[in-house]
Image: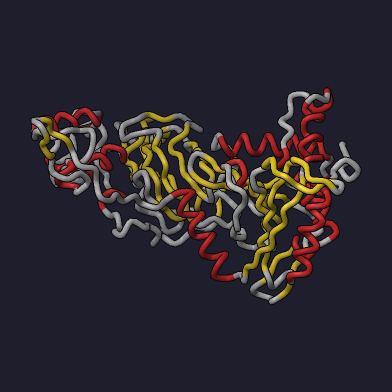
């Protein structure tokens, strides 16, 4: 009995929800590493969620095939693993390579295997050949003709510094170039490993001298690649503006009663441990108003030219996460009592701010609420999420002189802004919906069910 070693490509799985690609965020392994079954190999980002991809088997990492920041299509190879199994041979170790026999290989999914996606999938402006085929033994230094072995962060650092990795000697396992190897090479060349040489990059002007003190002039401009959440958000906003005729209506309303209710509920034992906020009252008001004005809870089917009215509410909540704006949805919010809605809102926003939302939580949504008031602004005109009929912006609650019961008094006042798809709702329908929301937040006590 001897050991058969197969070199297998682990491909980007189908993560569901019709996703076709993902961006590599961070590698957890490097060439030469031994990995166990279900050990996390890499973090990828798709549709605003970061997903950890586990290894489908135990083995040894031969090569990583995509760098951090690279966009990869479903079915494209991410990493080559050397997988050992027992097979009777004439003796000795047999090395069998299946990594290049990819045409019939199924595409892995998180729950099984699906049809293979087209191979032409890389979006870095160049095709990878030798790296995808790179059969470099991991037990000895790479030959000079092969592409140098290095983890994606090291390659990124080398690109920043303008270093040709073929000129760097690797001292890692199998001749892999480590950060220390690159830093030593830079030091020998009289360069810093902290970043690209300022003068060469054009990031900082030549040092200036004043009174014998040398200072650096700040850069006139910087460039940053658009990727990840910001890229997804930009694409969604362009699609929204290009496909839906959008209009907005405004309403400034006295929410003193809502603020008083929030204060009372925070002291109520039934809401102990929950973060009761004015936004929760607004969210509940939106759900109730949508039941009376379903045009704002519909979508436009571009294929059939039909209006699809939703008889459920998946309420999207816009949250500023660590990597950008995300919109997780409270599923079946129409069936939630107020306490349940407060709980779901607190849990979902906390997960979004911790960058812990799943793709399922970020999927869909029939209507969105965004709280721009937390940033100290009176209001704003939001852009629709693609496929939705409306989005409501909740501005900052401010103490203002306001007419109340025939007299001038200091009251808590807020501006509500509704942006809507004019194909799905006309001005009257939008105005009536916004007025309904305003009536509830003006006097919420008899309309909120504290289930």
Residue 191 in the figure: left or right of residue 421? left
Q: Nearer the viewer, residue 406 or 2?
A: 406
Q: Residue at x 24, y 31 (%)?
A: 178
Indicate left or right for 286 with 201 as reference. right
Q: Position of residue 279 (x, y in %)?
A: 71, 42
439 relative to 278 in the view: left or right: right
Looking at the rendering, in which quadrant would you find the C terminus?
top right
**Residue 155: x %, y % from top left:** 26, 41
> Considering only vertical position in the picture, is 115 above or below 316?
below
**Against 302, is 62 above or below?**
above
Is residue 164 visible in the rendered image? The answer is no
Q: Is residue 399 left or right of residue 351?
A: right
Q: Which one is nearer the viewer's eye here, 130 or 83?
A: 130
Number of marks present in the image shown:
0
- Coordinates of residue 427 in the picture (x, y in percent): 74, 70
Where residue 64 sits, quadrant-wise, is top left
Q: Residue furthest front?
A: 407
**Image point (18%, 42%), residue name:** 198
The percent position of residue 9, horizontal first and vertical second, equals 40, 46
Q: How was the colour assigned to the protein in this rendering?
A: secondary structure
Direction bottom: furthest residue: 305
**Residue at x 13%, y 43% (from the top left corner):** 206
Q: Residue at x 45, y 49 (%)?
A: 228
Quadrant location of the N terminus in the rendered image? top left
Residue 110 seen: yes
Q: Nearer the viewer, residue 351 or 415?
A: 415
Location of residue 424 with respect to 413 vertically, above or below: below
């Amino acid at each position: 009995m001897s050991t058969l070693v197969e070199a297998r490509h682990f491909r980007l799985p189908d993560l569901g929800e019709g996703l076709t690609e993902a961006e590599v965020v961070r590698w957890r392994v490097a060439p030469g590493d031994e990995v166990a079954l279900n050990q996390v190999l890499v973090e990828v980002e798709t549709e605003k969620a970061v997903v950890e991809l586990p290894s489908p088997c135990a083995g040894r990492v031969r090569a990583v095939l995509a760098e951090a920041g690279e966009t990869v299509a479903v079915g494209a190879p991410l990493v080559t693993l050397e997988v050992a199994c027992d097979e009777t041979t004439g003796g000795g170790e047999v090395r069998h390579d299946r990594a290049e026999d990819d045409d019939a290989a199924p595409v892995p999914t998180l729950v099984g295997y699906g049809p293979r996606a087209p191979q032409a999938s890389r979006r870095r402006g160049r095709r990878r050949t030798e790296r995808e085929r790179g059969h470099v033994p991991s037990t000895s230094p790479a030959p000079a003709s092969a592409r140098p072995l290095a983890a994606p962060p090291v390659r990124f650092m080398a690109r920043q510094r303008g270093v040709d990795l073929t000129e760097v000697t690797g001292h890692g396992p199998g001749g892999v170039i480590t950060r220390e190897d690159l830093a030593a090479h830079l030091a020998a060349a009289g360069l810093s490993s902290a970043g690209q040489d300022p003068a060469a990059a054009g990031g900082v002007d030549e040092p200036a001298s004043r009174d014998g003190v040398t200072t650096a002039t700040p850069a006139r401009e910087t460039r940053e690649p658009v990727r990840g959440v910001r890229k997804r958000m930009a694409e969604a906003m362009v699609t929204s503006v290009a496909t839906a005729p959008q209009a907005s209506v405004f309403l400034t309303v006295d929410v003193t009663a809502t603020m008083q209710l929030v204060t009372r509920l925070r002291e109520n034992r039934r809401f102990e441990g929950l973060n009761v906020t004015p936004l929760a009252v607004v969210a509940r008001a939106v759900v109730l108003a949508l039941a009376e004005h379903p045009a704002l809870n519909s979508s436009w089917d571009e294929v059939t030219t039909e209006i699809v009215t939703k008889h459920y509410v998946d309420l999207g909540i816009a949250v500023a996460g660590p990597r950008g704006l995300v919109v997780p949805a409270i599923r079946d919010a129409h069936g939630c009592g107020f306490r349940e809605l407060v709980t779901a809102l607190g849990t979902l926003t906390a997960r979004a701010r911790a960058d812990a939302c799943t793709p399922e939580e970020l999927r869909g949504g029939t209507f969105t609420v965004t709280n721009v008031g937390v940033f100290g602004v009176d209001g704003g005109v939001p852009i629709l999420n693609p496929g939705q009929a409306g989005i409501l912006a909740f501005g900052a609650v401010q103490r203002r002189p306001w007419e109340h019961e025939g007299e001038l008094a200091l009251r808590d006042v807020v501006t509500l802004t509704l942006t809507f798809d004019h194909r799905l709702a006309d001005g009257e329908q939008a105005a009536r919906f916004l007025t309904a929301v305003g009536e509830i937040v003006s006097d919420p006590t008899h309309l909120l069910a504290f289930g």
